[in-house]
Image: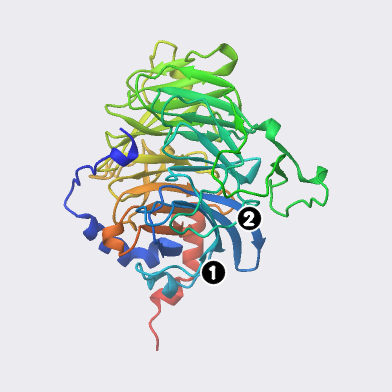
């Protein structure tokens, strides 16, 4: 079952979503170093950080990619925004505690709008050049956009769709959610309702800016490539967009492929999960058949997967059974033998998104339909006990932090690779936010994740200010 067909799961426990939110809001000044809340006009199904634009003393300016899922009164759009990311220990506590969940944050400014041919279900940036992004919509094709060179459009009723820079073909049915870009080479990976995993190379369609007349290299890190062929007219739909056929088509799933991911150290190895409850590892060097397959990775549909960028043996999966599993690929075989090395139980509804931290090998996040975004540390999964040796009651093993700032399902989030511990997340909470959903950018206070001895030493310096009464 795809995300738009996923109903809300049961809300177990004593607190309702609103009660959890109220409790969370009262703790915001204690838990966060910075929090920006942005009420959206239209819901966004995906959010991704783009390149760093400018560095200043107290904040950085950075690109952010979002979508606008409209009701049809205006076109769906791919939004490029500029975000002012406040640096650690800069935001005042009173600013953090007095945010207005019904307002639009001054830190988020729309920069450019691209009219998208259909809903934007997924956005993924090219690691070699984060100005180039891929999008999924309700079609078999993957669309590739050079967002920096696309013109900004007014999303008015009847406006033609912007023209993608490339269209990737190869799926036989709609491919809506499973989408990934390779960190090693300009490769794109996708999965769809046709049960296929499809691989493309866009290497031949990008060139170096320095080779073009009048071209100037961008000051942004990793953004020195662009598409080799451009057209001045991008307003007449997709008819004239160049297309690229598949480099490889892989068959092994028995139902819709919901998510895909590349191995962080190899362009030839990747994995996929689907509604058949399977986790499949692929190796393009050995052919189009699965390299290994876990037939029953979860007890329900699998919605998401991520591969640890610091340890290529560890893979996360999230499922409609409300759990996150961590697999060690060294334990997996071609016959599907292999059990998760950890099971993380901290959600009351389907897990929609999992992602490893780009900075810490044992830290990852999971977002779910229960409105929670949990941060986990798998190294602490077996060490959640009291001083007497008893397990802490009702405390999920490995749970490190719980972000409860969204009042409905958290459909996507993304760690900021430039600014450690900073996360952007989006939720579909139209009814409770008096708008089209919520975008939040937040950073956990560093006292929660720094080494304990460092934190205690710092707090000890301020002990006299806390314990000494005024004369």
Residue 327 location (% of width, % of height): 42, 26
Residue lying at 56% horizontally and 38% vertically, measured from the top left: 239
Q: What element carries label 2?
A: strand
Q: Is residue 83 left or right of residue 251?
A: right
Q: Is residue 390 left or right of residue 256?
A: left
Q: Which of 280 and 255 is in front in this view?
A: 255
Query: In the image, is residue 69 above or below residue 57?
Result: above
The quarter of the picture where the N terminus appears is top left
What coloring was used for the rendering? rainbow
Residues marked 2 and 1 touching at CB (< 8 Å): no
Residue 400 location (% of width, % of height): 38, 47
Q: Nearer the viewer, residue 28 or 40?
A: 40
Query: In the image, is residue 466 above or below residue 147?
Result: below
Q: In this view, does 312 lie to the left or right of 366?
A: right
The quarter of the picture where the C terminus appears is bottom left
Q: Which mark is residue 413?
A: none
Badge 2: how crowded within 10 Å, few (<14), some, or many (20+)? many
Sooner in the amino-acid sequence: mark 2 or mark 1: 2
Q: Which of 56 and 462 is in front in this view?
A: 56
Q: Nearer the viewer, residue 332 or 225?
A: 225
Q: Quadrant of residue 389?
A: top left
Residue 421 in view, yes or no = no
Residue 97 location (% of width, % of height): 38, 71
Query: In the image, is residue 175 above or below residue 388?
Result: above
Residue lying at 61% horizontally and 26% vertically, measured from the top left: 267
Residue 49 location (% of width, % of height): 54, 51
Residue 2 in view, yes or no = yes
Q: Is residue 408 left or right of residue 169?
A: left
Q: Write down the residue under mark 1.
A: 90
Of circles 2 and 1, the one toward us is: 2
Q: Which mark is residue 52?
A: 2
């Amino acid at each position: 079952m795809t995300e738009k067909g996923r109903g809300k799961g049961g809300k177990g426990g004593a607190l309702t979503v609103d009660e959890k939110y109220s409790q969370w809001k009262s703790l915001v000044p204690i838990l966060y170093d910075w929090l920006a809340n942005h009420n959206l006009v239209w819901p966004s199904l995906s959010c991704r950080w783009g390149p760093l634009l400018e560095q200043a003393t107290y904040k950085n300016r950075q690109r952010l990619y979002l979508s606008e899922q409209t009701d049809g009164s205006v076109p769906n759009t791919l939004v490029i925004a500029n975000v002012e990311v406040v640096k650690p220990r800069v935001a005042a506590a009173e600013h953090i505690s007095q945010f207005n969940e019904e307002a639009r944050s001054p830190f988020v400014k729309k920069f450019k709008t691209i009219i998208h041919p259909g809903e934007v279900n997924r956005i993924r940036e090219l690691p070699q050049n984060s100005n180039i992004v891929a999008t999924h919509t309700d079609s078999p094709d993957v669309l590739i956009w050079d967002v920096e060179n696309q013109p900004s459009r007014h999303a008015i009723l009847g406006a033609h769709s912007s023209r993608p820079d490339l269209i990737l073909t190869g799926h036989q049915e709609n491919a809506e959610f499973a989408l990934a870009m390779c960190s090693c080479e300009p490769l794109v990976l996708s999965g769809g309702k046709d049960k296929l995993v499809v691989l493309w190379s866009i290497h031949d369609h990008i060139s170096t800016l320095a080779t073009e007349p009048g071209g100037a290299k961008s000051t942004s890190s990793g953004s020195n490539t662009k598409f080799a062929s451009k057209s001045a007219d991008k307003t007449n739909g997709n008819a004239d967009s160049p297309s690229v056929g598949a480099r490889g088509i892989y068959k092994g799933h028995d139902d819709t492929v919901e998510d895909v991911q590349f191995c962080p150290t190899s362009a030839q190895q990747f994995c996929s999960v689907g509604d058949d409850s399977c986790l499949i590892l692929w190796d393009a060097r050995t052919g189009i058949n699965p390299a290994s397959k876990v037939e029953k990775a979860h007890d329900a549909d699998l919605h998401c997967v991520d591969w640890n960028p610091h340890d290529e043996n560890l893979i996360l999966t999230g499922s409609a059974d409300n759990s996150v599993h961590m697999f060690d690929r060294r334990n997996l075989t071609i016959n599907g033998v292999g059990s998760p090395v950890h099971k993380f139980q901290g959600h009351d509804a389907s897990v929609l998104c999992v992602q490893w931290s780009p900075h810490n090998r044992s830290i990852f996040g999971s977002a779910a339909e229960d409105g929670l975004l949990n941060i986990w540390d798998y190294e602490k999964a077996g060490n959640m006990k009291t001083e007497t040796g008893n397990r802490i009651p009702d405390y999920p093993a490995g749970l490190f932090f719980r972000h409860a700032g969204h009042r409905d399902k958290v459909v996507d989030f993304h760690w900021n690779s430039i600014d450690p511990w900073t996360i952007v997340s989006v939720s579909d909470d139209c009814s409770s936010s008096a708008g089209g959903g919520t975008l939040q950018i937040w950073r956990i206070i560093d006292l929660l994740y720094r080494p304990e001895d460092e934190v205690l030493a710092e707090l000890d310096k301020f002990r006299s200010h806390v314990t000494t009464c005024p004369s």
